[in-house]
Image: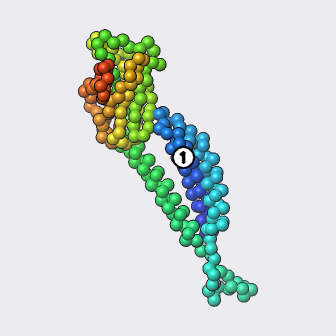
Amino acid sequence: MRFVLGFLSALLGALAGWCGLAALVVMLAGPDRDGGIAMGAFFDIGPVGGVAGLIAGIWLFMRFGMVRDAAPPATAESTDGVPHRAARLSLPFAIPVLLIAAGLAWWGWYEFIRSPNLSHGFMTLDIEFRLPAGMALPDSQEDVKIEVEEAQGYANALLPANWRAHDGERRAITASASLMYKTRHRAVSLTLPDIPTQRWPVDLPSDPDPTPGFSPWRVASGSSPTKIEMHFRLTADR
């Protein structure tokens, strides 16, 4: 039993150290615009915390995990007549361990239910921007910067090979991005050369269904003199 409890303490320490260090790095780094910081923190830096947590879990269990009763029962005697003191799990050690385990379980559950994989699987936000009449498209896709804000993170939208489009005589830009979380806070921003960044809120519920088609065209929020319009469509694997 002592070995099992020690193993569980070491495993919990490794998990707590891994997740704790990764979360600390992400928090100090600020908003993650493409998921690279979070991935690097979890897979590259997190193992360092896991090793430290593993060692700490073993040491704490050996030092504080088990205690012996001060007054052994009269019947608890060894073969040589010397009474043995019964060992039991230390309550001051067990309570923090249970709180840490509950916190890790809650965090894992929270991240799991935020993922759209519970409902529609991989979801893609197709975005189209319509420029004002007479406005030309940038020469290169490197001059087009499109960000999708979702919860507290940012992702750069991808431009396909045929990102140049048109709607009648008006030029247009097409792009797409993946939705990663269940949240009501979503927005799209577009930055073009010599034009201030324009931003559109994305009106979707926290756990959206695929849309039957594109939304109506909308101008950006604010008072930008460049009236670029945007509409979107949401598709899913299932």
How far across and down, in percent of the image, does residue 99 sit? 50, 61
Taking the view exactly as shown, the residue that stands out farthest to the left is 216
**Quarter-of-image position of residue 155:** top left
208 over 82 or under it: above or below: above
Residue at x-position 72% and y-position 88%: 81
> Which color scheme is applied?
rainbow
Mark 1, Cα crowd under 10 Å, few <14 / some 14-19 / many 20+, is few
Location of the N terminus by quadrant is bottom right
The number of numbered badges drawn on the structure is: 1
Disc 1, SS? helix
The quarter in which the C terminus is drawn is top left
Corner quadrant of residue 8: bottom right
The residue singled out by tag 1 in the image is: 24
Residue at the image point whose x is 37% and y is 42% from the top: 182
**Residue 151 at x, y = what percent?**
40, 40
Give the x, y percent position of residue 136. 36, 11
Amino acid type of disc 1?
A: Leu
